[in-house]
Structure formats: C-alpha cells, structure tokens
C-alpha cells in the first residue's frame, strides 16, 4: 500500500473519534481526507502497449466506425448563412476553417468522397473581397476577421479535381483563386519576396501566431513574421496553381507559377535557413532579425521540397532525432523541448497548445516529406508512434501530450487527427495524397474494409 492511502486511513480513524481532537482540527482533517480521496479517484492516463499497424485490427476498425459516426453526426453540418449546403468541419460548434479543410478532405478521400472540397470553398469564395482577401473561417464565432485564408485553396482544388477527374469547377473559380493567391503576396512590405503572417493582436497570442494556425506560438511569430511554414505553403500553392492552369488550358500561367515557386524556394533558403544551427526559422520583417525559436514549422521545407538533401540530413540528425529537442516519446512536439516556453499544458491559457504538444497534421506533413527524401525508416517510426498515440486514447482527440501520449483539446475530435489512423498504411503503400502531381487518389478504406456510413 502506498503512503497516501495509509494517510487517508489514518485520517479516517481520527475523524471517526471526535473525542480525541477539537472540532476545528477534526473538520480540517476531514477536508484533507476528502481532497486526498478525490485526487486518488481521478483516472490517470496510462499509455497502452504499442502495436504494429494491421489492416485487420478490430480495435482500428471499431475506432474508425466511431469516428465516422461522429463526423456524420457532428462534422457534416448544414450551413444556413452562406451556401445552404451541408459542409464539412472538425468542430461541432459550426465553424468552418481554412487549412483544416485540406486535411479533413484527405481523410474523406479514403472513402471516395470529394464534394466537400468544392462545397466548402464555395462558402469562402462567396465572402471574398474585391482585393482577393478571404477570411480564414466563417460561422457563428468572430474568429480571424483580419486573417487571410492560409495558402491551401489551390491544393484543395487539386485534391478534389483529381478525385472526380473533372476540372470544370476549378475553371469556374480560377480567376477568384488567382486573386486570392495574388493577395497573399501583398503581405510583403519590405519587398524581399517573402510573405508574413499578420493579424490583430489577441490577448495571450500574437496576431501572427493566430493567423498561422499555431495559435499560441507568440514567441516564434514576432512582428510581421515571415513564416517558414507560410512561405512553404505558398510554394506548394504556386505549384498547385500550375497544375490547375495546365488542366484548364491556361498555358501562359503554367510557366509563371512554376517560375515563381522556384524563386520562392531560393528566397526561403537565402533568408530563413541558418547554416550555423542547421535549421529554418521565421524572420521578423519589421526589424529584419531572425527569430531563433525552434518550432515544428521549421520542418515544413521538407514537406514542400524546399530543402536540399544536405539541409534535410542536418535537420534530421541534429534536431528531429535529438532527444533533447524534437525526439520526444511521441514525436514531433510543436516546440523543441529546449525552448524556454516549451510545455505540455495550458498554464492558464485557453485554446490550443502549440508550444509542445504533438499535432497530427504536422506529423503527417513531416512523414511524407521524409519519404520524399528517402528517410523511410524514420518516417515509418514517427507514423507508427503517431498511430499508437491516437489509438491508445479512448477517443480521437485534437492534440496530444508529446511525452505521455495523452489526448487533449476537443473530446471527441473528428477533424484532421483522423489522418493518424491511415498514415502508416500510406507510407507502407508509398502513397502520398499531398503530392501535387499524384493523379491516383486512392480509396484506402477498402484496404481496411470500412465504409463511411
């Protein structure tokens, strides 16, 4: 028996004999006993043993059925404000977001469902400003009013159009897509070719960190933050626009977008790579200084194909596999463990924690990026750890403790975390739905024998 239960039993005996102590002391001891009893009654998370990925796993099939039921019940909601259509979201409070939509639709693609790529985007295009600005979300909550839709629209269009084999929708909204992307390159007041995260300051966060989607990374996104992640997303967006232009016969635009993507890659390496430490960092456009904070965003150049083989080797060996930085029990934490404000809890802040917790979409990007650079073993190790982390909880969660694997945030969650269940299978099949040039979008659910219904 541990010491705490023994203390509890002792206090129980004392409290049952009021003649031995005065009433005030008796009451205080009883309160202490109740507190101890409460603490020990709380269920503590214990990570289950790791298991290999198995398409025949009953646990996996059961979890996917539960997840799909949650999506059908709470994630496919009627939008009565703009489109009057059922739209897709990972949030039951009826808010529809930007980059979430890309990853949510990858999950839906496993079941051959593509309409939400287009239906959700119609809602965003309906509120586009004449200058191209599209706010990053819509719904009942006044979030992101000054935040431009993160650079994922063209990638979403490519994902959906590859599934249907039809580019008519892409052609219909092509000019609006061009205008939205053009607006992004206005976030460049020093005219160095790199764009910055911006937005109105929020209590406890910087406007830039909120705009980035990594809500509370306020120590990374200082001032007008030329984000490594942002500019890598833009590289992929330019490449996706080149694909769309080719498919709809806009020949002049193809070369323009490809050349711009090439130039942007060079600028990222020129301004955001630090050769001394072997890592990518954001740069504050307002003072021209590098913000030396190691964030998971620093690995985005691997996913976007921006980094050279030499740079990737340094990032993997010196940082990703470094047990003092990013190689936690359940990698990859959103902040390096060496950062002063690294943590696995909120510490008084509301909302999502991007200062140390592990998030599925960033792991997903990193794994596919590593595969592209032939780091197959490490990619599969991260994918399996991610799979076990998510499956080890009683329900799919929004983000996870990088040290224990315990889920945090929304409970249950049915958005982008769902990708963790299929990630090991994707890597085993060498299938990457985020590959801009991937023409065969596969129904991976058939490999597991699960339907979406």
Image (cartoon, grey):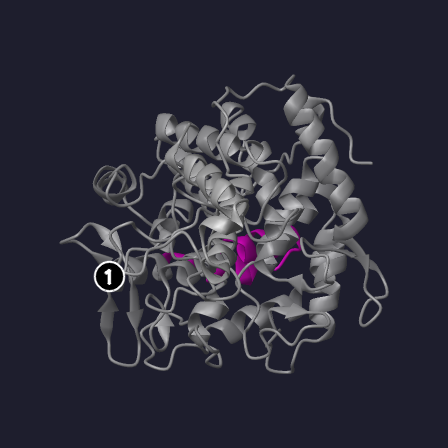
In this view of the protein, can residue 255 be seen by the observer? Answer: no
Residue 48: x and y in percent read 50, 26
Q: Residue at x 43, y 68 (%)?
A: 209
Does the magenta portion include 257?
Answer: yes
Q: Residue furthest left?
A: 276
Residue 305: x and y in percent read 38, 46
Judging depth in this view, the residue of 2 and 137 nearest the camera is: 2
Residue 326: x and y in percent read 31, 44
Left or right: residue 266 versus residue 346 is left
Q: Please, is residue 411 above or below residue 191 in the view?
A: above
Q: Residue furthest front?
A: 19
User: For the N terminus, which image quadrant?
Assistant: top left
According to the picture, the residue beneath numbered tag 1 turns out to be 270
Q: Residue at x 54, y 30 (%)?
A: 426
Judging depth in this view, the residue of 160 and 123 nearest the camera is: 123
**Main secondary structure along the magenta-highlighted residues:** helix
In this view of the protein, can residue 395 be seen by the observer? Answer: yes
Query: Where does the magenta region start and end?
Result: 239-262
Does the magenta portion include 414?
Answer: no
Q: Please, is residue 288 above or below residue 95 in the view?
A: below
Residue 175: x and y in percent read 65, 69
Q: Please, is residue 372 above or below residue 96 in the view?
A: above
Label 1 sits on a secondary structure element that is helix
Q: Residue at x 66, y 46 (%)?
A: 412
Mark 1 crowdedness (10 Å alpha carbons): few <14, some 14-19, many ≥20: few
Q: Residue at x 51, y 42 (%)?
A: 12
Judging depth in this view, the residue of 38 and 169 nearest the camera is: 38
């Amino acid at each position: 028996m541990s010491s705490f239960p023994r203390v509890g039993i002792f206090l129980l005996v004392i409290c049952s004999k009021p003649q031995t102590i005065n009433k005030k002391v008796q009451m205080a001891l009883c309160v202490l006993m109740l507190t101890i009893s409460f603490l020990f009654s709380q269920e503590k998370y214990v990570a289950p043993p790791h298991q290999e990925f198995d398409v025949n796993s009953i646990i996996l099939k059961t979890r996917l059925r539960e997840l799909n039921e949650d999506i059908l019940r709470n994630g496919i909601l009627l939008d009565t404000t703009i489109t009057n259509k059922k739209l897709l979201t990972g949030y039951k409070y009826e808010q529809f977001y930007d980059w979430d939509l890309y990853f949510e639709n990858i999950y839906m693609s496993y079941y051959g469902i593509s309409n939400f790529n287009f239906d959700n985007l119609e809602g965003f295009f309906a509120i586009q400003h004449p200058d191209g600005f599209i706010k990053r979300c819509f719904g009942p909550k006044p979030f992101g009013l000054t935040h431009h839709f993160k650079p994922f629209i063209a990638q979403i269009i490519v994902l959906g159009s590859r599934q249907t084999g039809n580019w008519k929708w892409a052609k219909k909204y092509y000019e609006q897509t061009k205008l939205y992307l053009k607006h992004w390159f206005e976030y460049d007041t020093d005219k160095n070719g790199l764009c910055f995260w911006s937005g109105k300051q929020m209590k406890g966060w910087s406007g830039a960190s909120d705009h980035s989607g990594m809500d509370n990374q306020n120590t990374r996104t200082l001032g007008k933050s030329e984000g490594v992640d942002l500019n890598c997303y833009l590289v992929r967006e330019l490449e996706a626009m080149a694909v769309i232009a080719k498919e709809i016969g806009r020949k002049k635009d193809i070369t323009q977008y490809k050349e711009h993507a090439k130039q942007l890659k060079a600028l990222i390496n020129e301004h955001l790579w630090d050769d001394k430490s072997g890592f990518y960092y954001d740069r504050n456009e307002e003072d021209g200084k590098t913000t030396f904070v190691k964030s998971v965003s620093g690995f985005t150049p691997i996913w976007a194909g921006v980094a050279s083989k030499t740079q990737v080797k340094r990032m993997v060996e010196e940082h990703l596999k470094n047990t003092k930085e990013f190689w936690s029990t359940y990698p990859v934490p959103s902040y390096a463990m060496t950062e002063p404000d690294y943590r696995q809890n909120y510490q008084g802040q509301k909302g999502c924690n991007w200062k140390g917790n592990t998030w599925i979409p960033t792991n997903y990007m990193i794994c596919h990026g590593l595969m592209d650079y032939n780091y197959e073993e490490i990619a599969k190790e991260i994918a399996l750890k991610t799979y076990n982390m998510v499956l080890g909880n009683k329900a799919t969660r929004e983000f996870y403790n990088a040290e224990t694997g315990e889920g945090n945030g929304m409970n249950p969650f049915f958005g982008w975390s769902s990708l963790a269940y299929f990630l090991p299978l994707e890597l085993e099949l060498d299938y990457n739905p985020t590959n801009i040039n991937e023409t065969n979008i596969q129904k991976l659910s058939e490999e597991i024998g699960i339907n979406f219904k």
